[in-house]
Amino acid sequence: MLKSPNFELKNMSTISTENYLKKIFNHNKVFGEKINAVKLAQELSVSNAAISDMAKKLSKHGLISYEKYKGIELTDKGEQMALNVIRRHRLWELFLIKVLNMPWSEVHEQAEVLEHHTSEKLIDRIDEFLGYPDFDPHGHPIPRKNGSLPDAQYYISLAEAVEGSSYELMQVDDHEKKLISYLTKVGFVLNTRFVVIDKLDFDKSYTIKFNDTVLSVSQKISESLYLKEIIEAGEKNG
Amino acid sequence: MLKSPNFELKNMSTISTENYLKKIFNHNKVFGEKINAVKLAQELSVSNAAISDMAKKLSKHGLISYEKYKGIELTDKGEQMALNVIRRHRLWELFLIKVLNMPWSEVHEQAEVLEHHTSEKLIDRIDEFLGYPDFDPHGHPIPRKNGSLPDAQYYISLAEAVEGSSYELMQVDDHEKKLISYLTKVGFVLNTRFVVIDKLDFDKSYTIKFNDTVLSVSQKISESLYLKEIIEAGEKNG
DNA sequence: ATATTTTTTTAAGTATGCTTAATTTCTAAA
DNA sequence: TTTAGAAATTAAGCATACTTAAAAAAATAT
Ligand SMILES: [Mn+2]
Ligand SMILES: [Mn+2]
Ligand SMILES: [Mn+2]
Ligand SMILES: [Mn+2]
């Protein structure tokens, strides 16, 4: 009997593949289109050659469909796997913050690791412990056990906010550790309600007020903060 | 400038090395002597050649001292690393059981993975959450952050117990998932108090009674159960 | 239609951590 | 003290997941 050839269709769930699937999924979610190979390489900080290799493997295992020069897309199977990793990631994030009081700024990094090392039974326990939550601490929806996603909430970014209106901070991009540290330090955390006092054309910065704090927010930061407008009692939407 | 040679003295903390260090430490703890290479290979289910390779690496990094044909021993540095892994393992076990209600029988396996993927900050939070416990759910001491070990408690195994005496179940070997499932099923869990009713010379099995349950325990199982004798009020030890 | 640029693949090589098979080194028993 | 048998090492190879450099393929611009 011959030695088995390069690789048969086994598990195919490694840390690397899980991270590839997640990136492909997220790009599609955010931009509504397939990710192309060069972009994926940049996002994952690997060479184009690495993408080429990996794309072959993922295709062979039926996790992506890849037409070269056209982009990479998840199959249903690949999407289910991606959702599962994202589920583990977001449940961990919430758990680390809510239960273990880890700082908001450190939680993403640790979840990025734990997401690959968590059995189904363990993640179910965490889910149960948290009361089957729908959103993670950054406001992102947590995929359910069955693979469905809670209704996405479409927030506007602070960069789209209007002077004089009131908002609640609902979501923050979680990949910039320093940003999250900063927001925590100044007390501008999730669910904080604030008013936009001023919008400076000069540098596109915003001046906002929450509690008794007046804060100037640069354009760059304003693009990472997502808000829900607060309609005051008595006002009518329309 | 030349490409860096085979390997410089970098981190040297990988899943593999952590598991090697743990095994070396535990053997020494249990048997009071260095582990020899062949034994280590068996324990880790790898070939002797793999041990040879890895022993070279661990030595080069100052984590073990290895005299061939004489055995492998941890250096102080290696021992601190081992204790750290064991700390993470045991804290996770306790956390998974106490906080997340995972079944006793599944906890070891999951901890075996998580121990390699837990930042210092996270494990400190878990430690704090649990109130800086001294013992894990199998009765084993949990190394402290500073590397010290709570005073080991020396229990006797059921195989050494005496007919007619009362005991409390204090510790169970955690590597046999099936054993732990079984004990849980029959209700013979940690801290159960029981009386040894009978000791059969025929097959070295024990008959014990706890609550209203009478249980026959085979020799093999009896060797994995560790007990503390209960001195009844009024009795005197001596 | 042809040329340029971008995208993609191939080829060769690295590191980790294993394997089996062959060989060497050492211990211990006769 | 020779020697059989452990114990340990070396050699060659595999799998994963990367790298750089070179080549090929397709898209785009002229
Ligand atoms: Mn995150
Ligand atoms: Mn990750
Ligand atoms: Mn354990
Ligand atoms: Mn382990």
Image (spheres, coloured by chain):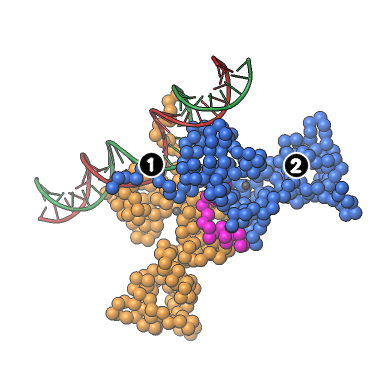
Chain colours: A orange, B blue, C green, D red
Q: Residue at x 33, y 56 (%)?
A: A33
Who is closer to the viewer here, B181 or A60? Answer: B181
- Residue B41 magenta: no
Please give left or right for residue A90 compared with residue A62 in the image. right
- Residue B124 magenta: yes
Q: Which chain carries label 2?
A: B
Mark drawn on residue B6: 1
**Which stretch appears magenta?**
B111-130
Instruction: Point out the residue furthest to the right here.
Output: B234
Examine the rendered structure and indicate whether residue B180 appears above or below residue A188.
Answer: above
The residue that mark 2 highlights is: B157
Q: Can residue B196 be seen in this view?
A: yes
Residue B51 appears at what percent x and percent y?
A: 51, 36
User: Mark 1 Cα within 10 Å, few/some/many (few <14, many 20+)?
Assistant: few
Q: Residue at x 73, y 39 (%)?
A: B223
Q: Which residue is drawn at 55% across and 45% down?
A: B75
At mark 2, the secondary structure is strand
At mark 1, the secondary structure is loop
| Residue type, numbered disc 1 | Asn
Q: Main secondary structure of the magenta part?
A: helix
Q: Mark 1 lies on which chain?
A: B
**Mark 1 and mark 2 in contact (Cβ < 8 Å)?**
no
